Image: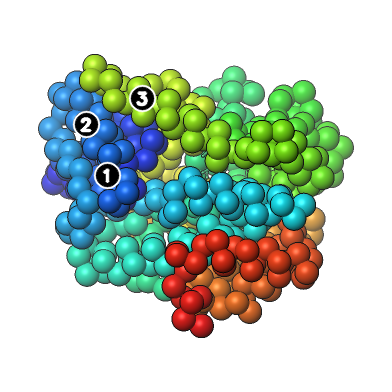
Amino acid sequence: MNKMLKIAVIGGGSSYTPELVEGLIRYHDTFPVGELCLVDIAEGEEKLRVIGELARRMVEKSGLPIKVVATLDRREAIRGADFVSTQIRVGGLDARSRDEKIPLAHGLIGQETTGAGGFAKALRTIPVILDICKEMEELAPEAFLINFTNPAGIVTEAVSKYSSIRSVGLCNLPIGTKMQIAELYGRAPEELFIEMAGINHLNWTTRVVLDGKDCTADFLGRLSDSGGFTMKNIPDLAWDADFIRSLGALPCAYHRYYYMKSEMLAELLESYKEAGATRADDVKAVEAELFELYRQPDLAHKPAQLEQRGGAYYSEAAVQLMKSIYNDAGDIQIVNVRNGGIIACLPDDAAIETNCVIKADGPHPIALASPLPPQIRGLLQVVKAYEELTVEAAVRGSREAALQALTIHPLVGDERAARTVLAEILEQNKAYLPAFAAE
Ligand code: G6P
């Protein structure tokens, strides 16, 4: 247990990487990383160089014996790694911008990870992640894949169905929600247990337990005057108190796209029509500002400006997970794993996002206190079926699965619209979808 660990970060040139570095430094006493290998693709070389240098300055300031390597050689990065973390964006922010705009042009919600936008991202991403898994099978078969890459739930499902690599899908939303609930009660997050059930970006907080007492009803009652439980990237539309009470759970921030579809669409369309801009364009501006800062040779910490991004607590989530696996901690974290019967209304091999006990061999999902009620089950099953079809579409290059996936997605829900949007997605992403070209 006292060997120095090697972590490979694929997509290491991401503006989020300083978050991760900060966490690796903070927890070095219980998670002794000896080598941090940041890897990126040739187009990202300059960003990788900047991030690599900043990471080196951060490590140097900490005085810890962590070697930082920045490389374009993915195989060398993966070789012998104990953990491989993926935070890639296939096609970059330009592709995200297209994902957001294609649906909007047809009067549909255009979003990074849900609806038709998230679908396009899944098609581009799954083949690349499965390639990474193949390299891991060869070069680091015992390593854990910690996947942050969106759409994280769909990617986790693809990996668990099509690779032998041990993998965990990770998102900052659960930890962020827990922090916000703790804050509402004036407590530390460790003093609180929350039960979350569902899938990534569509999970419900079904129970809140404080000092051993179930205070879910009290919590739901407080929501009307507690702000919106949202994230930087999602408009903070308030939940209706009666709706929340009858739902019997706290929806996640992304549920606004489903439960308040018209209002959310109007919000998105307004900024799109006014400035021709979507979130991807805002993020480009934030990134430019961040990289300007990252380049400053005296900067040796994560700048506060990073908080403008949606990925708050990314570092907490990633480092806590790797640390608990390494230490066989047996603590509870909310991550994306294979269902295996925990959510009875979903297939066993579906990826779900729920509470897990984290052991040396990975996360073990915990039974739910009670089965999910119909108002949750109904939406969950539909979106999971969409995800299942999307994985099939991406892996097999199947237009049929793709059309069915989009048609049943609640943010599309129309065969004609699905057909039109799918044609545009396939056309505009041609360069990233060889499986479709071959069909
Ligand atoms: C949240 C989500 C992430 C998502 C991010 C987008 O943190 O959980 O999955 O990628 O927001 O943030 P951005 O700043 O890129 O819009």
| Outermost residue to the top | 298
Q: Neighbour class for label 3 at 10 Å: few (<14), some, many (≥20)?
A: few
| Outermost residue to the right | 242
Q: Nearer the viewer, residue 209 or 428?
A: 428
Label 1 to label 2, Cα distance in Å? 12 Å
Which numbered disc, 3 or 1, marks the residue that appears first in the sequence? Answer: 1
Residue 357 visible in rendering: no
Q: Which of marks 2 and 3 is in front?
A: 3
Q: What residue type is labelled 1?
A: Glu
Q: Is mark 1 within 8 Å of ligand 1?
A: no
Q: Which of 397 and 356 is in front in this view?
A: 397
Q: Is mark 3 within 8 Å of ligand 1?
A: no
Q: Mark 2 points at which residue?
A: 53
Q: Is mark 2 within 8 Å of ligand 1?
A: no
The picture places residue 388, in percent across and down from the top left corner, at: 59, 70
In contact (CB < 8 Å): disc 1 and disc 2: no
Residue depicted at x 75% and y 55%:
106
Q: Name the residue under label 3.
A: 292
Q: Is residue 161 above or below residue 288?
A: below
Label ID, residue 45 = 1
